[in-house]
Image (cartoon, grey):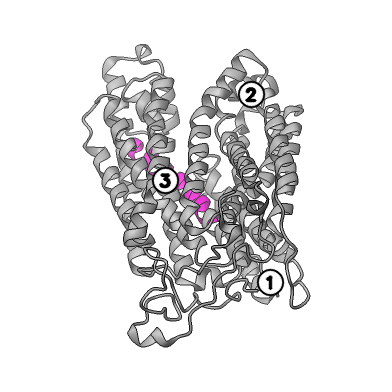
Amino acid sequence: MNQGPVSGTPDPPRPRDPRTATPAPEANGPDGDPAGPEATSVPPLPPDPGPAPGSPAPARDGRRGAVVAALMLCMALAALDGTIVSTAVPQIVGDLGGFSYFSWLFAGYLLAVTVTLPVYGKLSDTLGRKPVLVIGAALFLAGSLLCALAWDMTSLIAFRVVQGLGGGALQGTVQTLAADLYPLKERPRIQARLSTVWALSAVAGPGLGGVIATYADWRWIFLVNLPVGAVALWLIVRHLHEPARERTGPRPPVDWAGALGVFCCGAVLLTALVQGGVAWEWLSTPSLALLATGVVLAGATVLVERRAADPVIPGWVWRRRTIAAVNLALGCLGLLMVAPTVFLPTYAQSVLGLAPVAAGFVLSVMTLSWPVAAALSQHVYRRIGFRDTALVGSGAATLVLLAFPLLPYPGSGWQPALLMLALGAALGLFQLPLIVGVQSTVGWAERGTTTASVLFCRQIGQTLGAALLGAVANAVLTARLGTSGDLDAVARALDEPSAMAPATADALRRAVDAAVETVHLGAACAGAAAFVLLLALAPRRFPVREEHTGPAAERG
């Protein structure tokens, strides 16, 4: 049975045009680019035979719907957890104390999710999707229960890290299983469902957290995860079946040394990025020490991975042009997303004078158009291909972000809301074709690693974007106000504009407006970089693998 290309090999030499069901007219060279008509004599790539060895086969017994429901519940848990805690911070701090370091409630979870993504991706290819997802869900639920029992801020942060260790498995394995369960022509449907769940959960999270913190105890924010997660775990255990995989030799040992290296290196570097400019200055001793330690750990991890029999992050992830291009482009997407998600609510409240609920609506309209555009993107990429569809999306996103500084001052709420509606549509055309496309270039045995690398790069982009764009915003405030500027401090001062002179309040609003405009220009640069990277590195036609069309690919 074919399990996809062997690790370290180039992209398969015989692509299939995503616009048709027949092989593309030209074969690929070693780097994934079309090699010209003279290469058409290369033998065609054998098809990936349906539910490749070890892949789930719930469709054969009519239980795919139950597995999809479990995946959507897992995705909701992961998405809610990033936002539901934010509105309950005052109650949590009032009960547990620790105001000076409460930001680690979010940073600790983010760090754990990010650094474990590549580890879980490799484990899902080695051990199977089901055990990884079950362990991840169990860890997430255990962390949720421990968070509800926390006795001080330190313990709560530690238990949030435990949650994050499970959240990394949820995010990566859910996306991988979605590709396992559906053939290429149906993947946009499941990906659009997952995008919708993520969007609705992200929007509902702050409101739900506020309601729970106001009318109940904040600990229920974590306890509500238990019944939802228990249902998802039961559905996975009962309905997700992975046939035994055929092996031609002994299984390579799990690369635990590489996993530890990735974890430690990622934790140190991400800590430097998350805390730089917040807990300490960028050029301070702690920041430089962490960055230097991270570089040393990165070098050591590379050496360990090069000698491993089956590395956690195999070299082919970056040697194959298609995967490398998608990784870099979605890293730019992660950076780009920081501008609207982090800075737009501050702009809406401080500059436009909107209430928190209205400010949230300005951002939430993006989550309405994103899944719709993602669901419709299949009609575009079937005509023009994965790469060109993503180029349309990244180009449109860049233009929308460039339009933000053209908004009038102070303006009305509907103006940025209209831009966010357009941005969501552009990002739906940008992200989903790349994820579906890159998953379709590998077989089952490499899909977990590939998906995890894509999500890992997107998370790194978000972390890097928060650090860089935060520094840009504060620099603009400093230049406009003549003193050391901090966006959060200025925003808090504008919560009560009546307490200051009208001229002072107007100067602060204009400074925030200039800072957020500059941040969106930086995000537009990230969108332009994604466009250039895709145009320069990604092959015009992705080398899509042939897929099984028998019973395992039928709708369950």
* Residue displayed at 56% across by 50% down: 555
Percent across and percent down for residue 399 are 26, 47
Q: Secondary structure at mark 1?
A: loop
Q: Which residues are magenta?
A: 456-479
| Apparent side of residue 380 relative to residue 290 in the rendered image (left or right) | left
Q: Which quadrant of the figure has residue 48?
A: bottom right
Q: Secondary structure at mark 3?
A: helix
Q: Nearer the viewer, residue 538 or 66?
A: 66
Q: Nearer the viewer, residue 301 or 443?
A: 443
* Residue displayed at 66% across by 49% down: 169
State which tag comes first along the sequence, 2 or 3: 2
| Apparent side of residue 144 relative to residue 354 in the rendered image (left or right) | right
Q: Nearer the viewer, residue 392 or 338?
A: 392
* Residue displayed at 65% across by 71% down: 305
Of the two numbered discs 1 and 3 in the rendering, the one whose residue sits closer to the viewer: 3
- Mark 1 is on which residue type? Asp
Label 2 belongs to which residue? 93
Relative to 55, does residue 464 appear above or below in the rendering?
Answer: above
Question: In what quadrant of the picture does the N terminus appear?
Answer: bottom right
Residue count near mark 3 (Cα–Cα under 10 Å), binned few <14, some 14–19, many ≥20: many
Relative to 497, does residue 459 appear above or below in the rendering?
Answer: below
Percent across and percent down for residue 307 are 68, 76
* Residue displayed at 35% across by 52% down: 379
